[in-house]
Image: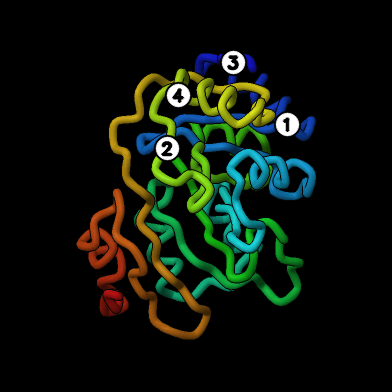
Amino acid sequence: MDVLTPHPLPHAARLLAAGEMVAVPTPRWYMLCARAADPAATSAIFRAKQRPTAKPLLLLLDSPATAEILFDLSTDARLLTGGLWPGDLALRLPWKPAVEPVAAVGSPALVGCPDGVLGQLVALAGEPLAAAVCSISTPAAGEKDHPALTAGQVAVFQRTTMRAGIAAVVDGGICPHGRHMTIVDCPAVAAARLEREGTVHARAVEAALAPAGGPHVG
């Protein structure tokens, strides 16, 4: 497994284009990433995490404009993408009827538009990426595995999962937050609903949705 600093991100993008899996830092923890359109590459994420294929992956986009192309966005969804993307907010979005859903991320899809190093890599890749936290999924993990907060912990994950198949890790230092993304469910014809509060505060979601009357807190 190569260890890359953030500067040679084009190399990481080339690995992704070749169907490889790459670990990338966020402010929260390291994420395993692969081309969303490549079933073999997304299968590698499921295998590495020992994750049931019935539990979809996160879809990462480069911009709100790409979300407009792929998904049926409500007024609330547009307010959230305009106010809080890029960032640590994920939206549960329905695909447009004419768009074939990506199997690995399911329907509706959980969609993010990251900032920082991961956002730069999505832009360089030039296409959506599928992603999941670098850790073994429960219940397979029991109490023995935790999300990787350093590149060294990604290397340990690689060794302890019998060579998970990570081609490279982009070393972004220590991830300080250690919390999940905030998730908002955005149906096409109903009000947005706060599904899980994480790094993006519920009041920030409320502020973004203020023109539409705010979210229904779930």
Q: Secondary structure at mark 2?
A: loop
Judging by the rendered image, the residue that carries numbered circle 1 is 20
Q: For the residue carrying disc 4, how many other residues have a C-alpha within 10 Å: few (<14), some (14-19), or many (20+)?
A: some
Q: Nearer the viewer, residue 63 or 137?
A: 137
Judging by the rendered image, the residue that carries numbered circle 2 is 144
Mark toward the start of the polypeptide (4 vs 3): 3
The residue positioned farthest toward the left in the image shown: 203
Q: Nearer the viewer, residue 156 or 118?
A: 156
> Where 214 sits versus 6, above or below?
below
**Mark 4 is on which residue type?**
Gln
Q: Residue at 45% x, 24% y: name it.
A: 153
Q: Is residue 66 visible?
A: no
Judging by the rendered image, the residue that carries numbered circle 3 is 8
Mark linked to residue 153: 4
**Image color mode:** rainbow
Mark toward the start of the polypeptide (3 vs 1): 3
Image-based side of 190 in relation to 206, left or right: right
**Mark 1 is on which residue type?**
Glu
Q: Secondary structure at mark 4?
A: helix
**Mark 3 is on which residue type?**
Pro
Q: Which one is in front in this view, the residue at disc 1 or the one at disc 4?
A: 4
